[in-house]
Amino acid sequence: MWESFHWLLPNIEPPTWTDGIIAIVIVIAGFFIQRYIMKPGIAFLGRFVRDNGSPVIADILEQFSTAIRRAFMAMLIILSLSVLVETWLFTYPSTKNFFLSLMFYYAFKGINDVLTFYLKNPERVHTGKDQDLLTPFFLRISKVLIMIIAMFSIASLWNFNINGFLTGIGLTGVAIAFGIRDTLGHLFGGMSVALDKPFQIGDWIATEDNKIDGIVEDINLRSTLIQTGDKGLVYVPNAYLVNRPIYNLSKRTKRKCEQYFYVSSTNQEDQLRALVEKIRKQITLHPQIEKDIIHVAIDDFKPGSYRLFIRYHVTTNDTGVMLMIKQDIVFLCKHLFDEFAIELVPETNELWLRQE
């Protein structure tokens, strides 16, 4: 049976019982070492480093643990086989590349495990700060690059023709790029959102055409998840958002309020002027209304009616608070209408409806 391996290992010798026992002992000892010494040892080192203010290094150690232990076991298995066939397989021309390929694989596997961990926990990259949209993107790109570097590194050990392979990949990449140009547009849109940061998760945004209006629930590279006013969820392609003006309503420190009242044209002009001045003064006294811009005026006239226009800004971005302030102004106007004996026009006044 051993003669069939001479094409690979010409100097192979049939193993003895002693060789077999030594090989088995090496594998078993290696299993216990990596399981009960290396694993808890790396975990202890990780905790020690974390306690001393280096959480990123601790994460890297913990994620590299599996790759290190498996590489150690691979070395011991090759060592046990070397004892078994009485040939040093680590440097033997026919098996050296296989051993080096395994070491490359586990080295890049460890790096990939670290990137996968941070991809699932991107906030750990900043040790507790808010998640950055670009972090998952660069982690995904890094994973792809690591796979490509690992593939080329291992291929170079076996004298693989990389130039021809790269030419094929280039042609294929051009064809794929044409097929997924829309997806690429969304990805670049996601990068624009990440770089410009016009909004973040939790912000209330709206587009100029009011087709999108709601709270940002999630942002990824292709789309943004928005919860609308009726509690529906909408996935909006990033390319759609970056090509339209976006109002970040959460960034407002003030809210504009406009209210209209329609009064009969039978009311005396001096009464209306006195009413306008009194409403303006009373609004100015409200503690949550900006004093700089308060507009109260009769701004339009229609057959049988005047329009009383009121505009002011409240110093809040809370919709509930804003509505309560508007309520205050409505009641204020009601009291002043009664005080000045102002006659209002019903909302169903057909003259207004026909001419607005």
Image (cartoon, helix red, strand yellow):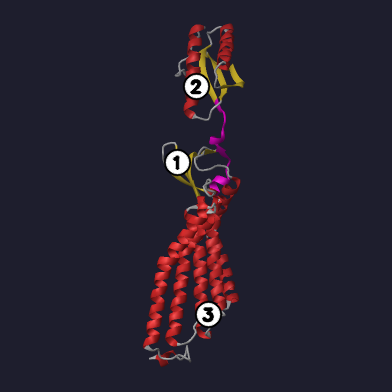
Numbered disc 1: secondary structure = strand
- The disc placed on residue 326 is 2
Three-letter code for the amino acid on which mark 3 is drawn: Asn
For disc 1, the marked residue is 227
For disc 3, the marked residue is 97
Residue at the extreme bottom: 3
Which of label 3 and label 1 is nearer to you?
A: 3
> How far apart are the alpha carbons under marks 3 and 2?
78 Å
Q: Are marks 3 and 1 in contact (CB under 8 Å)?
A: no
Mark 2 or mark 1, which has the lower sequence index? 1
> How far apart are the alpha carbons under marks 3 and 1?
55 Å
Numbered disc 3: secondary structure = helix
Is residue 175 shown above or below 289? below
Residue 350 picture location, percent across and down: 47, 19
Q: How crowded is the residue under tag 1: few (<14 C-alpha within 10 Å), some, or many (20+)?
A: many
Q: Is residue 244 magenta?
A: yes
Boundaries of the magenta span? 239-256
